[in-house]
Amino acid sequence: MSDACAAAVLGGGSFGTVIGNIIAGNGHRVSLWLRNPERAGEINHKHENSEYLPGYTLDNNLAATCILAEAVADVEIVFVAVPSKSFRDVVRDLAALLPEQTIVISLTKGIEPGGFRLMSDILREELPRNPRGVLSGPNLAREIAAGQVAGSVIASETAAINTLIHDLLHSDSFLVYSSADMFGVELGGALKNVYAILAGIGAALEFGENTVGMLLTRSLAEMSRFAVHLGANPMTFLGLSGVGDLFVTCSSPLSRNYQVGVALGKGQPLDDILGEMDQVAEGINTLGLLKTEADRRGIHMPLVNGLYAILYEQRPVVDVFDDMMHTEEQQDVEFVTH
Ligand SMILES: NC(=O)c1ccc[n+]([C@@H]2O[C@H](COP(=O)([O-])OP(=O)(O)OC[C@H]3O[C@@H](n4cnc5c(N)ncnc54)[C@H](O)[C@@H]3O)[C@@H](O)[C@H]2O)c1
Ligand SMILES: O=P(O)(O)OC[C@H](O)CO
């Protein structure tokens, strides 16, 4: 563990709370910024965030506040864990508050509409002087809160930042690995959410394991093809933040994106599903942005096109899956075998 330092986590949902608590458990002072004063009071007095992670005891080193300036005062590192649609607003408010040496790390797995910007792009635009990075991997918050071993990848602009974040977060049950491919790590975390929705539909349709294996493989090939086209390192997609996260999110009922897929596969309308969810499923927004970008660049994305047709063109799920599974996928095969 590194010398004790001070960090802020912005966003008091499930993932922000878990990451803040890991850092606090490693002996560092953590301020968790959230908007709901009642929840902040509960965290400070009962050491629990019962709305998101009931029964998960929070460390004494973790203190919640609803005042952003208070949360980030005198901290060396800020982690941002709000949904992608709120990311720019939150980060913009930081501009007047952070000295330029404060490191900012995104935990968010999404894409901003209008120009296909990743969260690190938003950090570069809003906080151009601050060092930045992303943390991504197969990290279901509830499993981490239950003490299950998990791994994650820190990717940033320098090896020194990676080492610092590793030392801050690494523990016996949360293993942190390092990557220089910030773009690929971040893109993997955002893209896999779309394929988790498809996997959930497959689960609702009671696909056999052979079919699930084929769907997962084709999902990996498709998301890798897209990312490599945009400049990511293909090897990143064979690691924890690529296939690791894809596998987890496409197979766990704890994943919100997978849950959306299961409900869709059972015939529930999308608006009803989203209306009932009190947590973010980033894959829905990512789907439309991914399709637009892939179409613009002429990238072959049959699974994305199929899911889009189910959600927005009222095509029957069974027909779309039938088409998807029987489409000749020479490009996927080439990617996987070379
Ligand atoms: N939960 C996980 O297992 C997990 C793991 C890794 C990454 N992520 C990613 O982290 C991000 C957050 O996920 P989560 O699971 O914590 O979501 P969540 O839905 O559990 O919580 C999001 C929190 O952000 C808050 N929020 C929303 N808009 C805000 C704003 N403008 N200002 C301040 N707070 C705001 C919400 O009130 C909520 O408390 C997502 O992009 C998600 O993909 C989640
Ligand atoms: O619950 P989801 O679908 O947002 O997935 C959570 C994490 O990203 C899994 O790594």
Image (cartoon, rainbow, N blue to C red):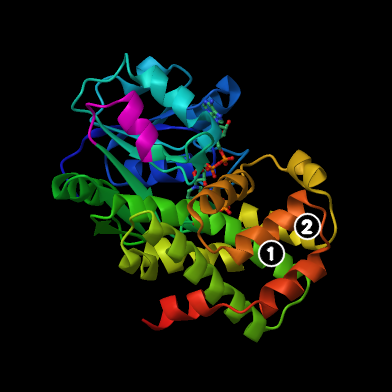
In the foreground, 171 or 267: 267
- Secondary structure beneath dot 1 equals helix
Q: Is 287 in the magenta?
A: no
Q: Residue at x 32, y 13 (%)?
A: 96
Q: Residue at x 62, y 46 (%)?
A: 288
In the foreground, 44 or 314: 314
Looking at the image, residue 211 sits to the left or right of residue 97; the answer is: right
Q: Of the residues shown, which amino acid type is indicated by label 1?
A: Gly
- Residue 220 position in % (x across, y down): 49, 69
In the foreground, 297 or 83: 297
Looking at the image, residue 66 sits to the left or right of residue 282; the answer is: left
Q: Please say if 42 is above or below 303.
A: above
Looking at the image, residue 178 sits to the left or right of residue 205; the answer is: left
Q: Is label 2 in contact with label 1 (beta carbons under 8 Å)?
A: yes
In the foreground, 227 or 150: 227
- Residue 15 position in % (x across, y down): 49, 44
Q: Of the residues shown, which amino acid type is indicated by label 2?
A: Leu
The yes-or-no answer for disc 1 within 8 Å of ligand 2 is no
Q: Please tell me how crowded label 2 is: few (under 14), some (14-19), or many (20+) other residues with Cα within 10 Å.
A: many
Q: Which mark, by number, is residue 264?
A: 2
Is any atom of residue 123 visible in this view? yes
Q: Which residues are magenta?
A: 120-131
Q: Is 130 in the magenta?
A: yes
- Secondary structure beneath dot 2 equals helix
- Residue 5 position in % (x across, y down): 21, 35
Q: Please say if 89 is above or below 55.
A: above
Q: On the image, numbered disc 1 is attached to which residue? A: 200
Mark closest to the chain's N terminus, 2 or 1: 1
Tell me which corner region of the image, top left, top right, bottom left or bottom right, holds residue 152.
bottom left
Q: Which mark, by number, is residue 290?
A: none
Tell me which corner region of the image, top left, top right, bottom left or bottom right, holds residue 197.
bottom right
Q: Please tell me how crowded label 1 is: few (under 14), some (14-19), or many (20+) other residues with Cα within 10 Å.
A: many
